[in-house]
Amino acid sequence: MKSLPALAVCLTGAFLTISQAASAMECEEITLGSAISLTGKYATNGVHAKNGYEFAIQKIKDAGGAKVGDKCYNFKVIYYDDESKGDRAATLTERLVNQDNVQYMLGPYSSGMTKAIAPVTEKYQIPMVEAEGASRSLFNKGYRYLFAVLSTSEQYLASAVTLAAEMAEKSGKDPSSVKVAIAVENDPFSLDIRAGVLEDAGKFGMQTVIDEKLPRDLSDMSAILTKVKLLKPDLLIVSGHSKGAATAVRQIGEQKISVPMIAVTHCEAADVVGNFGDSANDILCSTQWAETLSYEDPLFGSAANYEKEFKMAFPEYADKTVPYQIAQASAAVYVFKDAFERAGSLDKEAVRDAIAATDLMTFYGGIKFSEAGNNIAKPMVLRQIQDGQYNVVAPSEFASHKLNWPRN
Amino acid sequence: MEQVLGNISLLFEFPVVNLKIIVDGVMVGALFALAAYGLALVWGVMNVKNLAQGDFVIAGGYVSWWLAGKGMPPLFGVPIAFIVLWGIGWVIYKLVITRVIERDLFTSLLATFGLAIMIAQILNLLFGSDTQSIQLEYDTLYFFDGFVDIPIAKLLGVLMAAVLATCVVIFMKTSRMGQAIRATAQDARAARVLGIDTEKVYAFTFSLNAAICGAAGAIIVMVWVIQPFYGIAYSIRAFVIVTAAGLGNLPGVISAGLGIGALEQYGAHIFGIGYQQAVAVLLLLLVLLVRLIQQRRMRQSLQ
C-alpha cells in the first residue's frame, strides 16, 4: 500500500510531461479585453477598429504566434459593446477585469470612451494599448498603464499652419501676415486641434480672424462661411468629424468660398470626393496614416501590402480605401505582440515595462512612447485632394506630390 | 464680447449680409415649418405631443437617400418618402399610439420619447452613424457680387415644401376626411356622436403627420446633411414653433417657422454658430413666459 502514493506521483508526472509536450506544438491563448462601440453613434468606427484588431490577430496566428519564452501564444479578444456610452464602457471594463480576469486591454473607439476607461484600467494596473483615442488630455493625467499608437490630436492640423507659413514666405510675404480662420466642434478632440493650431499660429505671429465653435448637430455653417467671405483669411481650419467635413465642403462649393488653403479633418469618413466632387478639390485633409507611405515591418509588410491583405480578409472594404482607424488598431495588437516577446513572460508589470520601452518600426509608422504614453515617433500626414485623388503633400520627406497653392 | 461686437459691426459694414442671412433663414425655416405643422396637427387632434417628430424627418431623409443610392432620381424621393413614412406612421399608430391616446400626458410623452430613441437606433444599425446627403447636379444662383447664393436645389426644396403645405391645407379645408379631422380636434366626443369614426381619424392624422415629416426629411437630405441622431434638432424646433404659433393656426406656424429660421441665422452670425440652437431654445423660454403671463391675465378653468 505504501507504494501507491509514489505510483500516483509518478503517473501524474508522466501525464504532465505529455500534456506539456502537446502544448508546445499548439500555441496557447492570451486573452485581451476590449469594450468597443458596436452600436450607437461611434458604431461605424468601432467596427473598423474591431476589424483592425481581428486582422492583426489572424496575421500573428498565421505567422506562428507570439514567442514568449519558449512557448508560443495566440491572441484572443473578449469584446463587449459599450453602446458609444462612456459610463457603459467603464462598467464593462470592470466586468472584463473582475469577471473575465482579463489582464491586458485593447482600447475602445474615441477619446471620450478612452477617457472613461483609463481610470479603471489604471486602478487595476491593467496595461492598455489604445489606437483610437487621440485627445491630448489623455496624456497629462499621469496614467502609467495607458499607451497610444496614434499621434495626439493637437498635431492633426498644426502642420497646415507650418505649410501656410512656408507658402507665405515663398510668395515673398511675412508668415505673420497670414490670417487664420478656425471653426471646430465643441468636443475634446476638436478643441485639441484648435489648441494645436492656435499654438503654432502664435509662434509665427499670425492673426486669428475667426474662431468659432460648431454645434454637435451641425448641418449648416453658412453663417461662418459668410464671415470668411468678408474677412478673407489665408487659412481656414474646419474640424467637426464627418458632419463638419461634409457640411464645410458642400457649402464651400455652394458659396464659392475662395481661401488659399483649407484644411479639414475626417474627409474620408465623409467621403467628400464621392459626395461633392469638384468642391472638394485642393482641400487638405489630415490623416494618421495613408497606404502610399513608405513604412514597413516584417509582419504586415509595407503599408500598401497591409491594405491589400486587409481587403482580401475583409471583402466589404474592397471598393474603398482602408480607413486609418483600422491600420492603427492593427498596430496596437502588433505592439502587444512585440512587448510580450521582449518581456519573455506574461507578468503584467513586465509586459507594461516592455510596452513602455517599445521602439518599433511598423507599416503604420514608428512607435515609441513618451513618458506620458503617447506615440512620439510618428508624424501626422496631410493629403491634398487633387482631381479626386488623395495625394500626400506634407510632411515633405514622405510627400509624393506637390501642394497646389493657392486654392482656386 | 469683442467678437460679438465685431460681428454686429460686420452687419452694418456690409448690409448685403443681412439679406443673405434672411434668405438662408427663410429657406431653413420653411422646412422647420413643415415639421411643425405636422406636430400641430397631431397635438391639436389627438393631444399627443410627439417627441419622435424629428426622427420621422430623419427617417424620411434616409428613405430618400437609400433609394437615390439605388439609382432613383433624388427628386422622386420626396413623394416616396411621403408614402413610406405614411405606412410607418400607420403601423406605429396601431402598435403604440392608440394605446396611449386616452392616457395622461406623461404616458404619451414617454411612449413617443421611447419611439424617438428606437427610430434613431434602428436607423443607426441600418445605415451607420456617418452623415449622409444627396448632391443634386444643379447650379447655384448668385446675386450681389456672389454674396447671396441660392443653390437651385435649395430653391426646389423650398418650393416642394410650399406645394406640400398648400396641398395639405386644401385637403384639410375641402375634403371629407379633412373636415372629420377638424371636427375631432374641436370635440372628439361630439364628433363620435355625429358618426365620425375617431379611431380612423386618429390613425389618419398620425400617418399624415409622419408622411409630412418624411417628405420634409427627403428635402432636407438634398440641401443639408442627415445623421441618425439629428432628429432631436428638428423636434426642438417643431416644439418651439408650435408653442409660439399656437395650435390650429397655420399662417402662424408658417410665419413662426420662417421667423425662427431667420432669427437662428442672426444668432449664428452674431454669437457664433455654436449658439444657433441656443437661440431657438431661448425663444421657447420667452414664448412660454409670455404665454404664462397672458394666461394668468385671463384665468380659465377647464375640466
Image: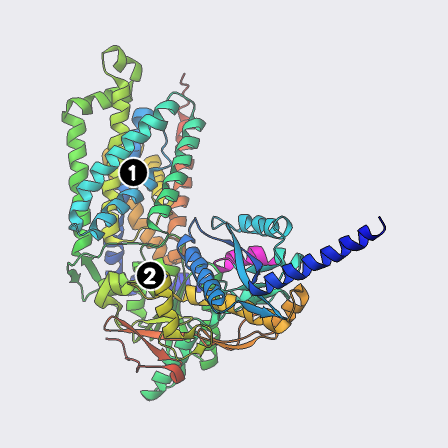
Magenta: main secondary structure equals helix
Give, as a three-letter code, the residue at label 2: Tyr
Please check whether the numbered discs 1 and 2 fall on a single chain.
no
> Residue A394 at what x, y percent from top left?
38, 79
What segment is highlighted magenta in the picture? A108-119
Q: Residue at x 31, y 51 (%)?
A: B226
Q: Is residue B242 visible?
A: yes
Find out whether residue A378 is within the magenta segment: no
Instruction: Describe residue A108's horizontal placement relative to residue A47 as left or right.
Output: right
Of A239 and B130, which appears nearest the observer? Answer: B130
Name the residue tied to disc 2.
Answer: A317
> Residue B61 at what x, y percent from top left?
27, 46
User: How far separated are the C-alphas under marks 1 and 2?
Assistant: 41 Å
Name the residue tied to disc 1.
Answer: B36
The chain carrying label 2 is: A
> Residue A323 at what x, y percent from top left?
38, 65
Residue furthest right as drawn: A2
Q: Quadrant of the C terminus of chain A?
A: bottom left
In the structure shown, which secondary structural element does the residue marked by tag 1 occupy?
helix
Q: Is residue B247 visible?
A: no
